[in-house]
Amino acid sequence: MANKEEIALMAHLMRRAGFGATYEELEARADKGYEATVEELLNPETQPAIQDDILMRYQPQWVSKAGLEGQQEEWTYRMINTKRPLEEKMALFWHHIFCTGHAKCEYPKQQNIELDMFRTLGFGNFEHLLMGLSADPAMVFYLDNCMSHKEAINENWGRELLELFSLGVGMDGNANYSEDDVKEAARAFTGWTVTNSIPRYPYGKYEAAFIYDPSDHDYGEKTFLGQTGNWNGEDIVNIVARQPAAARFVARHMYNFFVADEPQVPAWQNTPPRDPEAIKTLEDEYFRSNYDIRSMLRVLFNSDFFKNAQFEKVKSPTETVVGTMRLVGDFDMPRPGLNAMTLTIRYMGQDLLNPPTVEGWHTGREWIDSGTLVERINFTADAVGNTSHRGVQAIINRLGSQGDTISSEQLVDGCLQLLGHYQLADVTRNELVALADSEGTLNTGTDEFGQRVGQMLQSIVATTEYLFE
Amino acid sequence: MTSTKKDPVLVVLQLSGGNDALNTIVPYGDPLYLDNRPNVRIPIDQVLPINDRIGFNPAMAPMKRLYDDGKVAIIQGVGYPSPSRSHFRSMDIWHTCEPDKVGDEGWLGRAVRDLDPEKTNVLTGVNFGRGLPRSLVAPGVPVASVGNLETYGVLTGIEIEEQRSKALDVFSRVYSPMLGQGPVLDYFAQTGLDALEGADILSTAPEMYSSSVEYGSDTVAQYMRNIAQTHLAGFGTRVLYTTAPYNSFDTHAGELANHTRLWTETSHAVADFYDDLKEHNAGDDVVLLVFTEFGRRVHDNGSGTDHGSGGVAFVVGEPVKGGLYGEYPSLEENKLLEGDLHFNNDFRGIYSTLLEKWMGLDAQPIVNGSFEQMDFI
C-alpha cells in the first residue's frame, strides 16, 4: 500500500499531467508506482480512446462541429472523461501557445482539426509540430498567410511564428531575431495557402485544405537568422528548431504550464526564469533528444523541481471546471446541462477556441478578478456541496467509515486529504475546525453527516489556497 | 453640461448580434429601400415617421414617445474604417477602440480606473450578465459582474441562510490573513474581500427599491430594472452595463418576426427604465447608450439579412439633446461599401462625447485618439 506522501505526490502529478483524479484512482496509481504512471501518461495510445459513436448519438450537433459552444462542450466532455488525460492536457497546452481564435476563423470544425493535430503531433518532435502548424488551414487563415504573396508579403505569420510560436522576442536581455528575419521568413512562406473558402450561406461551411502554390512562391535568395539560401518554409522551420532560443521557449512554456507560474511571455526577454536550473535541464533534453517533446516531459515529471512545486500554480478555468467534474463524478455521460457547465469556463475567463488575442490567455494570477473569482467559487462549491454526486458520496462514506463519531479535526483534515492532499495555512485550518466545532458532534451514520461533509468541502474550495493546484 | 450636482452616470446596453439599422430607423421614403428589401421590409404605412424620409420601426413606439419628448439622440451611420463583419472581432473593436490590432483593455474599464483611481468603491463599475464583456476589462480594475441581482453573492448555492452566513463569516476570516502574504496572495485576498463587500452592498438594492413601473419579463428588461435598482440605491456606481443575450440581433433568418419581438422588448425596457428614473427624480444623472457591433447587409437574403456595416446607435436620457445626428447613409449602389451602408460617424466620437461632455473624463487616452465630438449632450 502506498503511503500518504506517495498519494499526495500522485495527486500532484495527476492534477498537472491531467485534470485530477478521485482518491480511489490516486491510491491505485500510487500502488502501481510514480514512474510507471508517468510512462502510462506519456503513451496515451496504450489507453482506450473515447467511443465517439456513442457521443454522437447523444449530441448529434457534435458531428457537424458548426457552433463554438458545441465544440467547447465536446472538448470539455473529452477532458472530463478521457482515459488519456495527458493527451488532452497537451492539446490544451499547445492551444494556449499556438492559439487560433473563433473570432476570426468562425468555423470550429476547422479549429478541431488543429486540436487533433496537437493530439497526434503534440508529443513528438517540435520541428514536425511546427511544420504541422505552418500547414494547418486554421492557422494559415488565422494569421493571414493566405494573404501573403510573392509580390506583396503579409508578415503576420512570419512574425508570430518567431515571436509567439518558437523563439520569443528575446532571452537573457538580447533579441532573438530582427525585423529583417521576420520579412525573410514571410518571403519563404509565400505560396503556403489554403483552398478558397466557400460562402457560408446557404449550405453551411466546408473545411479548407492546405495547398502549396509554387506559382506564388518567392524563389529569391533569403538571409534568415544569419543563414543565406533559397529558403522555403520547411527551411525556416528547420533553422528555427535548432536555435537555443527554441529550446528556451519550449522549456519556459512547459515550466509555466506544468510546474509553476512564470511571468507572462512578453516579459521573457528581460526577466530570467524562476528556476534557471530547471530550464537548463529541459533545454539540454530538447537538444539531447532531437527536439522530442515526450522526452522533455519525461524529464520534467520525474524531476525534483516538478515534485517540489505542489500548489505553485493557479488553476486555469478549464482545469478548475474539468477537475471539479472529475472529482465529483458528474458528466460521465453527455447528459443535458453540459452546455451550462461548459459555459462556466467562459464565465471564469477562458473562452476555449476563442482566446482574447493571438498571444493566448495570460495565466497565473491574471485568471482572477472579482467577477471570475465569484464564478469560480460558486461553481466549485455547488458541485462539492451536492451530496448526490458519486464522488462526494465516496468522500462521505470514507470519512464515515472511521467510527460512530469523528472529530472536527478529522473532518477538516479528511476532506483536505480526499480532495487530493490539499494544504491550508494554519490560520485557515483553525477557522474551519472552529466552524465544525460550532455545529456540534459529528455522528457518522446520519443524513446530517453527509450535509456537514458537503458544507466543509464548500468552505475548503472557497479558500485562496484552493485557487492553486 | 448639466445642472445636476450628483455624479454623472453612464449606462450601456449592448445589442449583440448586429442590429439591422435599416429596419430600425427605416428609410421608408427611399425607393431603394423597397428595391433592396423585397422580403424583409417594414410595411411603409406602419412606420412611425420622424420626417418624410425616415421613421421608427413600428415595434419601437415607446422609444418614439421619448424621441418626441426630445430625450433620444439617434446617431445615424455609425461605424469605423475598414469594418469587420465578424461578430467577435467587430464587438472587440467597439469594446477596445483598437480597430487595427487586438487590444486587451476595454474603454469602460479605463473609464472606471479614471473615475476611481484609488479603488475606493468596489462598485464604481457594475455589469449585469454572466462573464465580463471586454469593454469593462482593465488589469487591476475591480468590476462586479452580476448574473442575478436578487441572488447575487458568494457561496449562493448554500440554501440554508444560517449556514450560508456562517460560511461567509469564515470566508472573510480566512481571506483577511492572506493580505500582505506576498503579491499574489495579497491580490487574491483583496479580490475576494472586494467581491464579498460588493455582493453585500448590492444585495440590499432590491429591498430598498419600490416603483410603479412594471418591466417586461425578458432578460434585457430585467437587467435594466436591476440597473435602475442599483442606481437608485445610491452606491456611487458610475458605469453600468448589460447585454442582450445569445447574439439575439443576428437575424439571418425569420427576421421580421424576431426583430419585431426584439425591439418590442428592448424599446419597452428602455422607456420603462427612463420612466422609472423619472418617477424617482433620478433621471437627470443618467445617460444611456444603446449600441450594436454592426448593421446588416442592405439587400435581404429572402428571410433575413447577413452581416453588414454602418449601424445606428441611440443615446437616451433627461440630459440628452434629442434629434438626429450624422447622416442617414445613402442606399445608392455606387455609395455602398461591398453591399453595405457606409459609416459617417466614428463610434469613438460617440464615446468621446460621452466621456468628456458627460462623465468629465479625458477621452483621448481612453479611445486611443481624438475624434469629432457631437452635440447630443
Image (spheres, grey):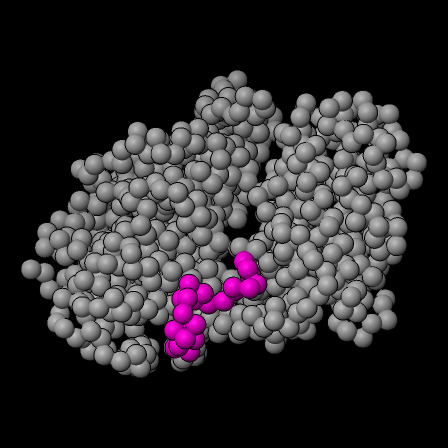
Residue at the (51%, 39%) spot, across then down: A102
Which quadrant, please, contains the N terminus of chain A? bottom left
Residue B224 visible from this viewpoint:
yes
With B105 as the anchor, is B281 left or right in this view?
Answer: right
A221 vs A10, nearest the viewer: A10
B62 vs A275, nearest the viewer: B62
A305 vs B344, nearest the viewer: B344
Q: Position of residue A389 (x, y in %)?
A: 29, 55
Residue at the (76%, 69%) spot, across then down: B280
Instruction: Answer with the quarter of the image where residue A445 lies.
Output: bottom left
Q: Position of residue B314 (x, y in %)?
A: 77, 49
Residue at the (50%, 41%) spot, across then down: A101
Query: Above or below — where is A134 with respect to A291?
Result: above
Q: Position of residue A437 (x, y in %)?
A: 28, 81
Q: Position of residue B58 (x, y in %)?
A: 79, 39
Residue furthest right as drawn = B52
Magenta-colored stretch includes residue A424: no
Query: Above or below — where is A298 with respect to B81?
Result: below
Instruction: Answer with the quarter of the image where residue B124 lies.
Output: bottom right
Q: How many numbered marks are there?
A: 0
Residue furthest left as drawn = A1
With B241 as the anchor, is A239 left or right in this view?
Answer: left
Magenta-colored stretch includes residue B155: yes
Which quadrant, please, contains the C terminus of chain A? bottom left
Query: Above or below — where is B312 with respect to A218?
Result: below
Residue at the (73%, 24%) spot, across then down: B39
Residue A168 visible from this viewpoint:
no
Q: Which residues are magenta?
A: B146-171
